[in-house]
Image (spheres, rainbow, N blue to C red):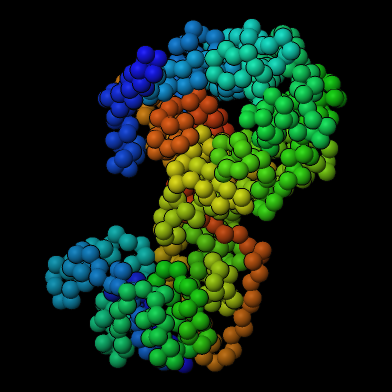
Amino acid sequence: MTALRKLGSKGYRVLRSYSRPSHLRVIARQLCKRHGPVHADSDHLEATIAWLCRSQDVVGGSGSSSGYFFETGWGPPYPETTGYIIPTLLRYADRCGDSSYVDRARSMGDWEIDIQLPSGAVRGGRGINDYPIVFNTGQVMLGWCSLYRVTREDRFLAAAVDAANWLLTVQDADGKWRRHSFMDAPHAYHTRVAWALLETYQLAGEDRYRHAAEDNIKWALSSSGRHGWLEYMGFTPDEASLTHTIAYTLRGLLESARFLTEGTANEARDLVLAAAHKTLRVYELRKRLPEDAPAFFPGAFAQDWRPAHSTSCLVGNAQMAIVWLKVYQLTQDARFLNGTLKMLDQVKQTQDLSSGNTGIRGGVAGSYPVWGPYLRLAYPNWAAKFFADALMLQEALMEPLEISRALGVET
Amino acid sequence: MIVGVTSDSRVNDYATILIAQLASRGHAPAYVLCSRRQARPGWKTRFTAVAGSSAGAWLRRARARTSEATQSLQAHAEANQLTGWDWPLTRVCHSHGMEFRSIDNMNGPEAVDYVRHWQTDLLINAGGGIFRPGIIKAPRTGILNAHMGRLPSFRGMNVLEWSLLHKQPAGVTVHLIDRGIDTGDTLLFEEIAVEAGDTIATLRAKALVTSVELVVRAVEGLASSQLPRTEQHENDGKQYFTMHPRLKQIVENKLRTWQ
């Protein structure tokens, strides 16, 4: 009976995936390779933020739903990603001067405190689970630190400090985290955890956090290869690394470099620059003729930057766009800005701003095509988060160029 | 010196004027090698290429009116008393006693053998896509190309626009093609003046005319062995890619107040 029930349930989910008109519309358009229009950054940004707000409202107004899934609808709240959606909402609040987004972020931060494990760690997985995960802990720390910076409410810093203390207790002597790690493996993308430790160090003044972060960065850099490649960027060592986790790694290195000792900081930045150059080149050369637009960025890479997926990871594309924009800020090499404009236009083309389905309207799918292997037939909340971040950063960097050139003012 | 010209279309104003100017200076090419991928142009282009047709002539005039590049080439041809500037290449070849050869693939064995058969000294790129090692090595001196940017600083695509975005001189470099992207030995560079009222389109048109003049000078220089070659190093410059319309708009705005 249990097997029958399971079969019935799976059958229902499959039926749900492929029978709803709004789902079929997405699938059909992408089968026919029909892309949506590209609107202004602000239009896509507003739609994405509206989707993020909806993701919070559908689960009761505290955390953010893990996403909208063709099979099952809206998912349970996801502690890890709720944590790093907080800075996105705060940034948006600052951009538009609307404090209601601060209130939303505060609700998320308080929910995270309510479900924080007694050890100080953040729970793993989607929904409320009992096990801690290192990476997730780091992401929520980023949220708490951002909230403390904006609100100066001590409980957020206190929560981040508790989390930081736990991270130090489970870190290996060589700087990596293996215990309480996804798949029980060390990951180079824990550089984002190092970043979180450094943000907490900045606010709390605890030198131990800085040392622990630097140890992790050094461990990650110890496996560097050609053109900025790092081992352990993926979920497991024997499979290709998703652009999602690659971009996690690179962003963690870049942000951490602001707080590290000079030698390590330079090494981290140099590696990110090398990786950014390589990935930009891979992207820009994905075309039949030089004058063509590039094809979508590959969803994963194997050793030494060999493209490993024919589909695209839209989350990774938005994240890589942020890395390129940060590199543009560092180097003023406008080729990175150029590549980002194209990459984000492609993500825009996949975003439906008018769907009647609130889980799709303004959301960003995990993969392109939507049936690709990363978050198949789903719109994860972290895709929306990173797309919103990328659009805000792009807007901020383009605005002075577009205004000054229009006025004929040299900047 | 045996010179050949490549083209990716039977209708190619740039190639036509180049050939006419080379011929007027005593360096008429021996042949045109046209890749068949676009050797059969679409109905519009074929229609407008019909000589003597009043509708074709009207469409040519209409095209000339709408294309900055075509207008510039036409003005250049008239200033230099070059006839047949808008003829199809088959007619141009016939009038200059040149051979016109269609091939499937500019990088295929047919093209390589043809170039070698002529004991070609120099091939001039007037269209033909990316050249691979086989065809690059076929002519004795090499393949000449006019690049719309200063080398080695600006390699790749839309380099005129990229130069302007970086407030660097716009211009044309004539260089020999090698396996890399715009990394071959450079021969000549000429700057293009940006004047009041210029747009990207008008500057591209000026660059096209400059390309013709510079290629002719390069051919003359190579023929007399008096043109020095400057080697490029891979790390000397950057490769640029097609420019996003938003950045192009920034360049257009910049041109309005260019100093």
The answer to whether residue B96 is left or right of residue B197 is left
Residue at 66%, 65% (x, y): give it.
B236
Position of B136 relative to A243 (above/below):
below
The quadrant where residue A74 appears: top left
Residue at 73%, 40% (x, y): give it.
A220
User: Can residue A243 be seen at all in this image of the molecule?
Assistant: no
Position of A3 relative to B113 (above/below):
above
User: Can residue A186 be seen at all in this image of the molecule?
Assistant: yes
Residue at 42%, 60% (x, y): give it.
A289
Position of A402 relative to B57 (above/below):
above
Residue A15: horizontal and vertical position, in percent? 30, 23
Position of A350 relative to B189 (above/below):
above
On the rendered image, what quadrant is the C terminus of chain B found in? bottom right
Residue A362: horizontal and vertical position, in percent? 41, 25
The answer to whether residue B12 is left or right of residue A260 is left
Residue A195: horizontal and vertical position, in percent? 72, 30
Towards the viewer: B171 or A128: A128
Towards the viewer: A69 or A53: A69
Towards the viewer: B25 or A155: A155
Q: How many marks?
A: 0
Residue A205: horizontal and vertical position, in percent? 84, 21
Residue projecting furthest to the front: A1
Residue at 66%, 40% (x, y): give it.
A232
